[in-house]
Amino acid sequence: MNYKKITVTALFVVFFIIGSYTVVPIGPVPIVLTNLFILLGVLLLDLRSSFLAIVIYVILGMLGLPVFSMGKGGIAVILGPTGGYIVGYLLCVIVGNLLKKVTPENLVGFLIVTIISALCIYPVGLIWLKTSIGADWTIAKTLSIGFYPFVFGDILKAVVAAILVKMSKPYFKESL
């Protein structure tokens, strides 16, 4: 049993929760910092640890603990309009960790990993949003509610995550 990995995985679950409390409510899908911490986890943790951290975060929320944005919890959040974005975190982590294996460990590589990973949240989130709120919505309306207001901020979070990891990598003697 690797206590370091267990501790760091648990710490990232806490970071995800902290990020979910940092909210800008702008409609059915709020802006949160959870994505930033997930992207940091993608770059700093291995696939198993980062995936496990997301799964624990989702399970805690589904059990009713107030870990999702604006202190919400429960299965209704997952089944509601933002649930697809939360499920999309799993795809983000998988894609990011696979990309990490084929990109260089430098700022450009980190940017490729974080930007593509961040964008992987959207397919699941947008389909879920359209299905749960507006089955009669057009694709344009779904994008205007669930993509356009967030994509610039998510790319900015991806850039910040890449820069933070690039700056901090020299201080890690071994991988987390």
Image: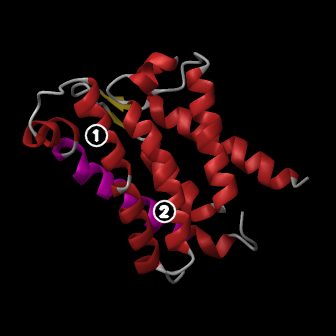
Front-lying residue, 65 or 133: 133
| Secondary structure mostly seen in the magenta stretch | helix
Secondary structure type for disc 2:
helix
- Which amino acid is tagged 1? Ile
- On the image, the x and y values in percent for residue 70 come to 41, 21
Seen from the viewer's position, the closer of residues 11 and 63 is: 63
Amino acid type at circle 2 is Val
CA neighbours of label 2 inside 10 A, class few (<14), some (14 to 19), many (20+): some
Residue 124 pos. (x, y %): 35, 44
Residue highlighted by disc 2: 95
N-terminal of the pair, mark 2 or mark 1, is 2
Residue under pointer 1: 127
Question: Residue at horizontal 60%, vertical 34%?
Answer: 57
Magenta region: 148-167
Q: Position of residue 40 (x, y in %)?
A: 53, 56
Please tell me whether mark 1 sits on a helix, a strand or a loop: helix
Q: Residue at x 33, y 40 (%)?
A: 125
x, y percentage for residue 41? 57, 55
Figure check: 144 above or below 113: above
